[in-house]
Image (tube, helix red, strand yellow):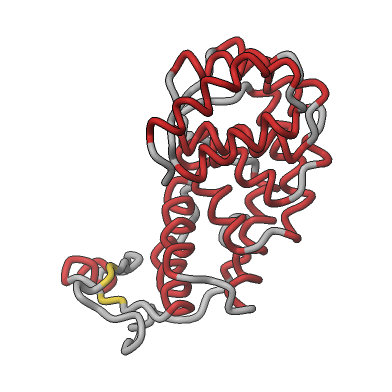
Amino acid sequence: MPPAGWTEVLLSSTLSQLDTMRSRELSMMLMALGRLRLRPSTEWLEAVLDEVKQRLDSLGCQALANILWALARLGYTPKHSWLAAYYVASSQLLNSFNPQELSITIWALATLHTWPNDQWLDDYFDQTQEAMEYFSPQHLANTSWALAKLGVRPPKSWMKEFVSQVLRSEEERGLTGPIVHQLMYALAWFKVPSLARWRLRLYDAVGFKVRRTRWRRRQQEQGQEGGSVIAAGSSARSVQVIRGPGDVDLRRLTT
């Protein structure tokens, strides 16, 4: 981390040069601050974002996504007018966003507790559904977590594709513990049927140990669906998953 005094002098010197800086340089400057989690003064950020706002229509996909990611890392929510202009500019390019850009954009909005308008969300769902086959497990986790954090439930067709890609990730052994936790948070919010069986299968994929509580066992004995919790102190390496009753085709659970 650079010395505070040095950083203040450097950032102050950029204010007189904002109009001569290239868009890529503005984006990289915000990205660097985001990576360092080094938040400048509000006045500095507003000055930089005012300059960025004038160029939103000419920014590319990567710059649009990276700038929003940087603001989320800095914990700074832009003004409503800036966000409105951002939604207009980004919606015109969503069909060109790659999986990384799609996932970090919605992640940034959720982190900033900022809700996009309905039209932007419709466009976002269309594009992510089309591109989801190229999503990594982390992209799936970030995207679904963000939608759940925003309190948004996707369309049924989007959910079917999402379920398919989650199962592909599980079959290809691309899941990790943190990714599974994000996915379970999202699946619970999306109200996917047989959530306990999802938990059993996904936890099994990453070696988490699952035990049933007495209350859940009583439910199962009464003909209700069983549940599960992670056993306290369980190890991700020396584990055995206690499976639920019967196999289930999870691809059918959203139909």
- Which residue is found at the position 16% from the left and 71% from the top? 214
Locate residue 137, reporting x and y percent. Answer: 60, 63
Q: How many marks?
A: 0
- Which residue is found at the position 39% from the left and 30% from the top? 5
Quarter of the view holding residue 236: bottom left
121, 178: nearer the viewer: 178
Is residue 151 something that shows in the picture?
Answer: no
68, 13: nearer the viewer: 13
- Lateral position of residue 232 relative to residue 75, left or right: left
In the rendered view of the protein, which quadrant contains the C terminus? Answer: bottom right
Locate residue 83, reporting x and y percent. Answer: 61, 19
Locate residue 30, reporting x and y percent. Answer: 58, 33
User: Is 235 situated above or below 52?
Assistant: below
User: Is 246 situated above or below 131?
Assistant: below
User: Is 89 situated above or below 173?
Assistant: above
Is residue 2 something that shows in the picture?
Answer: yes
- Which residue is found at the position 55% from the left and 49% from the top? 144
